[in-house]
Amino acid sequence: MTRETWATRAGFILAAVGSAVGLGNIWRFPWITAENGGSAFLAVYLGIVLLVGVPGLLGMFVIGRRAKRNPVGALRSLSGSNRWGFAGGFLIFSSLVLISFYSVVGGWILRYFGESVVGLVTGNVRYFANPGAAFGAASAGLDAVAFHLVFLALAAVIIVAGIRGGIEIATKWMMPAIFTLLVGLGIWASTQSGAAEAYAFYLRFDVSTLQNNFFGLLGPAAGQALFTLSLGVGTMITYASYLDEDRSLPFDGATIAVLNTIVGVLAGLVVFPLLFTLGIEPGQTGTGAGALFVGLAGAFAQLPGGTLVATAFFAVVALAALSSAISILEISVSFLVDEYGLARRRAAGLVGGLVAVTGSVCALEPSVFGFVAGTLVDILLTVGLAVCLVFVGWVMGRDAITEFRNGAGSLGQTIATPWLFGVGVLLPIFLVFTLLTTFGVDGKIGFWPTVVAAVAVAIAAFVSLRSERSVV
Ligand code: PHE
Ligand code: NA
């Protein structure tokens, strides 16, 4: 059977944007920005997206499009060595860890979307009236497990329908819907009384954070850039493996990064005016889950027209989360389809069944959830991307340059060689540096990053020492 491909170029770009635009843009980005100096952080972040995010994205694309295989098959076939398959296996493992917590949050979002619709229809907003207690109930026990399973099932249905018939069609209407709704919400938010104060807070250029803590900002900025651009678990390798034409990868990568950044900035322009209007300190309800499900939910209960706004808002977040979840699950599905010849339906069933269990553990056990979402995922993504970029630089080498240039415009031809040096040498060093500074405690190197990094280095060393590839 021939391997599936995207029907159109826009299909590939929108699917990749669908992967990139997700919870990271809405529940992480505005708060990280606001907490770390506003647009001063934004400037650092944009620099990292340009110098780390986009080149990294292109590294993943080059691997995927060259090999036209899932991450395990890709690293194996491009290196000519079975042992690089272990590095691909590490990516698959990371993607399963990631989706285990991601689909739990996706479940909460679905729950809140459902409650908004109920509020809209019945006029009863009890769920948002007492947000702390409501979130406590929604995020624990069987409630959390049930909605996680519904979310997972939705993602699986789209995956089973295939690349063209499922992922491509779904993301083709989801992305315009997300952009339209967000712009509408942003306009509505701008009419709220707290809007001016919120913009001043969100976009303030706080130079002192740059002066006092420039190096301290690099870690969070890099972590956010990797997460939000879906780097380090093999999603972008997998999606690029379904490309059949040589179109410009640098152009596609830049487009994806720009659209993804716009959504993050827009999300802040929506959430902060709501909070400021009600006098809720953005930091008061914490970041992430607390900010979204407690702070914002409270705002929805009090603002006139809040239920309608809540419905639109949670629709945006649900679509964003779903299109990202699809891209995470597709990694393992493509692995089972390519390597073991499984039918998509069966592969999706197996992966879904596994994540149903691992996600339920995250849903039921807050300490596991906290460790996975707060620490482990960032470490796995950073190590995963570093390993892939070393692969691009040192194993693919000239082939990577050739692949980068295929279909690229004249600028792409020129930057191919500096790009390879950047991704093969500078970025892995930078990534390891951010790993050690971010997760170090009191200036000491953290325990978990050391363990993961040591294991990854040991595997990489083992692999390259025993590599059977004859150098051409
Ligand atoms: N980019 C997604 C988000 O911002 C998360 C993600 C990470 C998706 C890695 C796929 C792979 O929510
Ligand atoms: Na998404």
Image: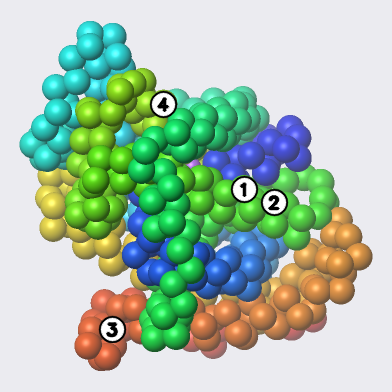
Q: Which residue is mark 4?
A: 312
Q: Residue furthest right?
A: 410
Name the mark nearer the viewer: 2 or 4. Answer: 4
Task: Say whether disc 2 or disc 4 marks the residue closer to the N-terminus.
Answer: 2
Left or right of 378 on screen, residue 5: right
Q: CA distance from mark 4 to mark 1?
A: 20 Å
**Badge 1 density bin: few <14, some 14–19, many ≥20, Cα 10 Å:** some
Q: Classify the position of the C terminus by image quarter.
A: bottom right
Quadrant of the snapshot with the N terminus = top right
Element class at badge 2: helix
Q: Image quarter for residue 456?
A: bottom left
x, y percentage for residue 112?
27, 29
Callout 1: SS: helix
Specify which label sits upstream in the sequence, 1 or 3: 1
Point 28% across, 66% down: residue = 375
Q: Do residues under tags 1 and 2 come within 8 Å of each other at their CB atoms?
A: yes
Comparing labels 4 and 3, the label whose residue is closer to the camera:
4
- Up the image or down, 367 lies above or below 385; here it is above
Residues under labels 1 and 2: Cα distance?
Answer: 6 Å
Near mark 4 (Cα within 10 A), the count class, few <14, some 14-19 or many ≥20, is many
Of the residues shown, which amino acid type is indicated by label 2?
A: Thr
Q: Which residue of the protein is positioned furthest toward the bottom in this rendering?
A: 444
Which residue is tagged 1? Answer: 259
Q: Which mark is residue 255?
A: 2
Other residues around mark 3 within 10 Å, as few (<14) / some (14–19) / many (≥20): some
Camera-near label (4 vs 1) is 4
